[in-house]
Image: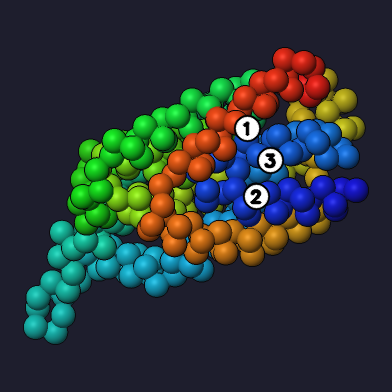
Amino acid sequence: MQFFDAIILGIVQGLTEFLPISSSAHLRIVGQFLPGAQDPGAAFTAITQLGTETAVLVYFWKDIVRIVSRWWLALFAFRDAAGAVRVPRNDPDARMGWFIILGSVPIVALGLLFQDEIETTFRSLWIVAFTLIGFGVLLGIADYVGRQNRALKDLTVGHGIVYGFAQALALIPGVSRSGGTITAGRFLGYSREAAARYSFLLAIPAVFGSGLYQLYKVVKEPCTQAVADATGGACTPEAFGALETALATVIAFGIGLAVIAFLLRYISKHSFLPFVIYRVLLGLVLIVLLATGTIPA
């Protein structure tokens, strides 16, 4: 049953990571309805996101290589045979590299500062329900009032900081990493595709950092039931073992790759309204289930 649960959660992770509906919220909710009926845990969530983020690397590989290489050349002012600077510091790709670094600072700082709350308090399904609804409504408003006249070349330092804090809100399950950054982008006047692309690129350092950190913690200091009992509950045993987590991560990669392609095609012609409606309805259903005691918070 552990492998069955892992397969289902891997599918859920792949389907929801890039849609603005919060993959962490869906893993948290779906986990309650699987045979094991438990929270998959923050570590499982972060590690399986390595799979979907690897899909971003594959899909945007050419863009990523270009951004990294030109950022590096501009940083050290490499010159050609004639002595001219090969890549000026105001090069769009070099600037994008800096914006990704800048936008990653808030989630790293806040992730470390609120690590305990992220792994415990913030995973309450009551919080998930209200963030699904609240940030879903915000996404709808931003998409409705937002202009469509800004592209990624129009990014500024101020916008990069706003994007960064919007991404950091995704530390709370139910907000959605892509949903938060896309909402900020639409309020700032960026097109749907520009906001989504920057959201995908911005997530790379944060997701890989979080996933690899959680993987390191699990390997270095595994928490078994025996350890939890011996330490008076100082740690929470992981719901899944290494094989189940690896399986879910691989599944998430394959499905996530397909979802990226779908979403970029979809938003080129359609609004985010269906996702807004889905978020609000899911949040309301979750509140009913919690209020009636059908599932625990």
Mark 3 closeness class: few <14, some 14–19, many ≥20 residues within 10 Å: many
Q: Find the distance from the CA under tag 3 to the CA under tag 2.
A: 7 Å
> Of residues 151 and 83, which is closer to you in this image?
151
| Quarter-of-image position of residue 82 | bottom left
Pinpoint residue 87: horizontal percent, then vertical percent: 18, 69
Q: Depth check: 287 or 42 in front?
A: 287
Question: Could you say which quadrant of the image residue 297 lies in?
Answer: top right
Crowd around label 1: few <14 · some 14–19 · many ≥20 (10 Å): some
Q: Earlier in the sequence, mark 1 or mark 2?
A: 2
Q: Amino acid at mark 3?
A: Leu
* Residue beneath disc 1: 282
Q: Which residue is mark 2?
A: 13
For the residues bearing labels 3 and 2, Cβ distance under 8 angstroms: yes
Residues marked 3 and 1 touching at CB (< 8 Å): no
Residue shown at the point (66%, 57%) measured from the top left: 252
Q: Amino acid at mark 1?
A: Leu
Q: Is residue 88 left or right of residue 209?
A: left
Does label 3 or label 1 sit earlier along the sequence? 3
Q: Picture coordinates of residue 210 (x, y %)?
A: 56, 44
Nearer-the-camera pick, 71 or 77:
71
Mark 1 secondary-structure assignment: helix
Q: Is residue 41 visible?
A: no
